[in-house]
């Protein structure tokens, strides 16, 4: 297969193919851009059907990380890695050690974090062989306690701040009291987000395909439970996707009654044209990689010195980032996602 001519290859600085016969490791590490700093991004383990699928995935994801970190004003570049294999059956200590040695050989140009198919425990294990893994240290909290490397509380806080920005822009209000919000997916991020929204006085509707997650959030935050397919058409102000990607598509957009789409899920638009369609219908979209940057900000500070107040303040900057995007989108009459890309490019190409 051709690599350089793939559209997803666009401007990648370095793509490394790694193999280790002894452990069966087959992995690809992609560094998209390191203008602003070392490339940080998740390490995904997935049983890709073909090598081409794995190459395309890693290239697309690493490029996305450049935009996310630049937009979040972090001194980080964008990168990602994929290990080809089934994480349930093929993830052995030998394979992780071989992958960690490959990271070490890159001398910190790429730093791996957990992603689908890998865990904080895997990163901790790899840290015996390389210092180029992130999300492995317990963090000091403001109340003197410590918490694990899990970035989802920071992601949820950033998403909450981002919803405030979108509500200010679209509905002209600062308070979330009485705001109606539908959350799709109440896992790690969605559950914490529900807590922040409840505290701010919002009314919540939630859905999930895991019953225990659903019941936990419904009970703790007095949220109304709806069926997965009913979440899109609710008469609410905000739809917050916090489950999976591509859920803003030809089928769901006509159902939406919300005037704001703002949630933590990655790659929410099935295609970029769906951003234009939201705009045409007067629905304000908070670009996913801007609003969900709390996690990468959290991981960044773990590497440079963690202080909860500093992290919280940096994550709160998501409000201003979104306001800048919304204002420019309004004046240029362009979809918010397009404007976000332009601003991110201005930052990492500067
Ligand atoms: P998670 O797996 O803990 O939670 C996702 C929840 O969505 C689960 O409870 C799952 O059952 C539910 N779900 C899956 N499919 C569904 C469906 N069809 N309908 C309703 N519910 C469904 O994941 P998370 O860490 O909370 O992340 C949520 C989203 O945010 C993901 O898209 C993730 O990529 C993105 N994200 C997460 C972070 C982070 O810090 N965890 C950072 C950036 C982006």
Image: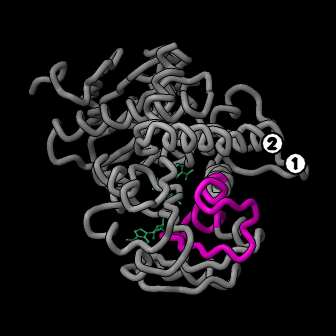
Q: Is residue 251 magenta?
A: no
Residue 98 lies in what quarter of the image? top left
Q: Is residue 180 magenta?
A: yes
Q: What residue would you read off at disc 2?
A: 308
The one nearer the camera, 49 or 274, is 274
* Secondary element at image label 2: helix
Residue at (47% x, 31% y) in the render: 67
Q: Residues within 10 Å of mark 1 (few under 14, many from 20)?
A: few
Q: What residue would you read off at disc 1?
A: 142
Tell me the quadrant of the picture where the N terminus can be found. Answer: top left
Is residue 63 shown left or right of residue 238? left
The one nearer the camera, 46 or 312, is 312
Extreme-left residue of the structure = 1
Which residues, given as a range, are shown in magenta? 165-193
Residue at (70% x, 32% y) in the render: 301
Residue at (47% x, 56% y) in the render: 265
């Amino acid at each position: 297969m051709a690599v350089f001519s793939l559209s997803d290859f666009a401007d990648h600085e370095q793509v490394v193919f790694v193999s280790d016969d002894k452990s069966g490791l087959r992995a690809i590490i992609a560094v998209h851009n390191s203008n602003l700093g070392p490339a940080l991004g998740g390490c995904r383990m997935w049983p890709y059907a073909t090598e081409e699928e794995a190459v395309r995935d890693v290239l697309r994801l690493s490029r996305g990380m450049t935009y996310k970190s630049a937009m979040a004003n972090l001194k980080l570049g964008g990168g990602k890695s994929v290990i080809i294999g089934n994480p349930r059956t093929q993830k052995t200590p030998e394979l992780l050690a071989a992958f960690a040695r490959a990271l070490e050989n890159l001398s910190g140009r790429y730093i791996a974090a957990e992603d689908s198919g890998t865990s904080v425990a895997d990163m901790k294990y790899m840290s015996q062989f390389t210092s180029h893994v992130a999300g492995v240290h317990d963090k000091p909290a403001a109340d003197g306690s410590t918490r694990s490397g899990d970035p989802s509380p920071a992601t949820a806080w950033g998403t909450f701040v981002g919803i405030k920005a979108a509500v200010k822009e679209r509905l002209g209000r600062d308070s979330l009291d009485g705001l109606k919000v539908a959350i799709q997916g109440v896992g790690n991020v969605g559950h914490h987000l529900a807590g922040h929204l409840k505290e701010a006085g919002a009314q919540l509707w939630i859905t999930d395909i895991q019953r225990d997650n659903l019941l936990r959030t419904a009970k703790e935050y007095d949220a109304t439970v709806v069926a997965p397919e009913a979440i899109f058409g609710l008469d609410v102000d905000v739809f917050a996707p916090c489950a999976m990607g591509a859920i803003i598509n030809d089928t769901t957009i006509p159902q939406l009654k919300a005037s704001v789409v703002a949630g933590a899920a990655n790659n929410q638009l099935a295609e970029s044209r769906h951003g234009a369609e939201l705009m045409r219908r007067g629905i304000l979209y908070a670009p996913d990689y801007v609003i969900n940057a709390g996690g990468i900000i959290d991981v960044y500070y773990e590497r440079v010195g963690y202080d909860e107040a500093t992290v919280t303040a940096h994550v709160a900057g998501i409000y201003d980032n979104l306001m800048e995007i919304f204002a420019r989108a309004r004046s240029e009459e362009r979809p918010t996602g397009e404007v976000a890309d332009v601003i991110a490019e201005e930052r990492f190409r500067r």
